[in-house]
Image (spheres, rainbow, N blue to C red):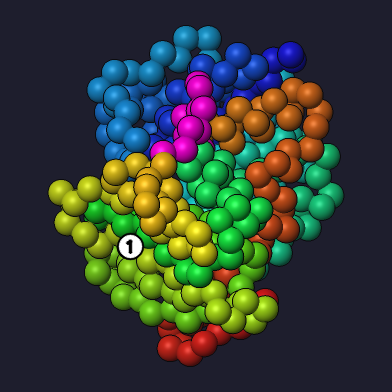
């Protein structure tokens, strides 16, 4: 298989996570890194903090043979790079995506793909004209437990879904990132956009884009007036008996464990992911599905392995997502933000 050469922008939590994954993918090779922090460009990631997955940030990254740049635009211009992987704060995404797509690069961008609807429109036009492939790090679509549950839902393996609840709750992320950018509502969008978006996307991936949403949220729990906690009900006109809700937030004390969970009750069984793992509950017994994750245990591993293989083989990467599906989920979470502020039921366009 053709070797795929990667230029990685940003060595924060997700950037270092991607770096480690690429190192173990035989078809992938990180050839360049860009970061405004000189210490990170020297391999020092001791200040990197995340809310899931652990990771050892005490040891410097081995950057032998990897070119480093303070200016990501210079790296994007390099002709020997096949993929530009963008792992920087959300407000910086658009400029790098547009430049890389125009340069003919394949682009993988971490979520949220952008900050607002206007930026999404600009990106949509660029993706339409791009020669390279484009994917977004909506990793839950590729996460083994969620992927298995979705297959059960879509095929109606256990009958119709009666209700579904998705939760993503994090300890406070204040102080966890470069210049504390998560805490600036204008930068991160608050927990509703940076964290809860994963479950909004999961809802859309499982059930399709909702017709309307009812959202209630709390601003300024830990951030600068961001929506730090949200609860949403998703309304589907063609499925009036279906109850789908999601809750997300990052306002808890720092000692609180991170939680990502779901409970999906169908006619014949309940699918549940929580601290006890992923199980399927029946009236008279409980099953633990075999997921056969192999060397790709998380959605991060699966999405990056798939994208790099598609680039290597010249195949459109549409297994986990299309741009239209990503845009639909993004518009839905934007509508949730509108609903929090209006206090009304808001229609999703």
Residue at image point 19% right, 51% down: 256
Q: Which residue sits furthest front?
A: 284
Residue at image point 79% right, 24% down: 313
Q: What percent of the width, then of the height, locates residue 343? A: 43, 88
* Label 1 crowd bin: few (<14), some (14–19), many (20+), radius 10 Å: many
In the picture, measured across the screen, residue 66 lies left or right of residue 181, that is right
Vertical side of 32 occupied by 155: above or below: below
The answer to which image quadrant residue 340 occupies is: bottom left
In the picture, measured across the screen, residue 181 lies left or right of residue 106, that is left
Q: In front here: 95 or 243?
A: 243
**Magenta region's main secondary structure?**
loop
SS at mark 1? strand
Residue at image point 48% right, 81% down: 214
Q: What percent of the width, then of the height, locates residue 270? A: 44, 57
Res. 162 in view:
yes
**Magenta-colored span:** 288-299
Q: In front here: 22 or 129?
A: 22
Q: Which residue is mark 1?
A: 249
């Amino acid at each position: 298989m053709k070797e795929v050469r990667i230029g990685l922008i940003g060595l924060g939590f997700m950037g270092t996570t991607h770096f480690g994954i690429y190192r173990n993918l035989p078809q992938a090779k990180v050839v360049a890194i860009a970061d405004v922090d000189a210490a990170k460009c020297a391999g020092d990631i001791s200040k990197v903090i995340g809310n899931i997955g652990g990771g050892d940030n005490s040891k410097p990254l081995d950057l032998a043979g990897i070119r480093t740049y303070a200016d990501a635009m210079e790296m994007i211009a390099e002709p020997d790079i096949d993929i530009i992987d963008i792992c920087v704060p959300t407000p910086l995404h658009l400029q790098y995506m547009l430049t890389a797509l125009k340069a003919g690069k394949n682009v993988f961008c971490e979520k949220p793909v952008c900050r607002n609807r206007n930026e999404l429109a600009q990106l949509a036009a660029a993706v339409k004209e791009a020669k390279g492939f484009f994917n977004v790090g909506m990793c839950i679509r590729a996460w083994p437990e969620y992927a298995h549950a979705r297959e059960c839902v879509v095929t109606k393996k256990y009958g119709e879904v009666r209700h579904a609840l998705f939760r993503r709750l994090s300890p406070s992320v204040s102080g966890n990132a470069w210049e504390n950018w998560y805490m600036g509502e204008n930068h991160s969008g608050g927990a509703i956009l940076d964290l809860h978006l994963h479950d909004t996307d999961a809802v859309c991936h499982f059930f399709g884009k909702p017709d309307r949403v009812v959202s209630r949220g709390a601003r300024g729990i830990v951030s600068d007036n961001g929506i730090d906690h949200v609860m949403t009900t998703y309304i589907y006109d063609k499925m009036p008996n279906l109850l789908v809700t999601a809750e997300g937030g990052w306002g808890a004390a720092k000692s609180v464990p991170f939680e990502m969970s779901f409970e999906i009750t169908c006619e014949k069984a309940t699918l549940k992911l929580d601290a006890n793992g992923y199980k399927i509950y029946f009236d008279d017994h409980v099953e633990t599905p075999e997921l056969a994750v192999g060397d790709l245990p998380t959605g991060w591993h699966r999405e990056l392995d798939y994208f790099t293989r598609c680039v290597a083989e010249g195949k459109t990467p549409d297994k986990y997502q299309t741009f239209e599906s990503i845009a639909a989920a993004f518009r839905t979470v934007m509508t949730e933000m509108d609903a929090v502020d209006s206090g009304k039921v808001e229609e999703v366009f």
